[in-house]
Amino acid sequence: MKSSFNHVQFNIDPANVGFYRDLFGFLGWTTIWEDTTEGYIGVGDGHGSLWFMGGANDSVNDHDGPGLNHLGIGTETQEQVDETVAYLRARNVELLYGTPCHRPEYAGEDGVYYSAMFESPDKILLEVVYTGSKEG
């Protein structure tokens, strides 16, 4: 059998749909479906999709507990991580864990792992990351 990634659903406060539409639009994803009445949006990158669905209850995910820790979104260059950082800072989104920064422990000898981590308004931990060869 051959399988592949298809989709992930996140339950959110419907008031936050715009955050995800704007962020993933900035990151180059396509809106597949949006329903402002019900408060949900689906975005895709051509390989799979992410769905942000209104109607979450009041429980909060502990990033270090069982379940999803974070969602990593890859970029093609290190500069695109920095562009995303500027986008986030312009919207007063706090960067977490001393990012943006290089993480050599994940890069390998000749590689780069450069990322920025932040939370969505629904406390979903997100990482925008460049992994690849050292540039220039």
Image (spheres, rainbow, N blue to C red):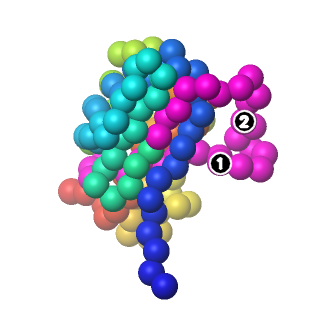
**Element assignment for label 1:** loop
Q: Are marks 1 and 2 in contact (CB under 8 Å)?
A: yes
Q: Is residue 86 above or below residue 64?
A: above
Q: Is residue 66 left or right of residue 75?
A: right
Element under disc 2:
loop
Q: Where does residue 84 sit, x and y in percent of width and height?
A: 34, 33
Q: Which residue is mark 2?
A: 61
Mark 1 belongs to which amino acid? Leu
User: As drawn, is 14 to the left or to the right of 35?
Assistant: right
Q: Give the residue at mark 1.
A: 68
Q: Is residue 87 magenta?
A: no
Whether residue 128 is visible = yes
Q: Which residues are magenta?
A: 51-78
N-terminal-most mark, 1 or 2: 2
As drawn, 79 above or below 94: below
Q: Is residue 89 visible?
A: no
The picture quadrant where one finds residue 133 is bottom left
Residue ID at (75%, 37%): 62
Q: Nearer the viewer, residue 101 or 96?
A: 96
Identify which amino acid the numbered label 2 is placed on: Asn
Tell which of 12 and 134 is nearer to you: 12
Q: Residues within 10 Å of mark 1 (few under 14, many from 20)?
A: few
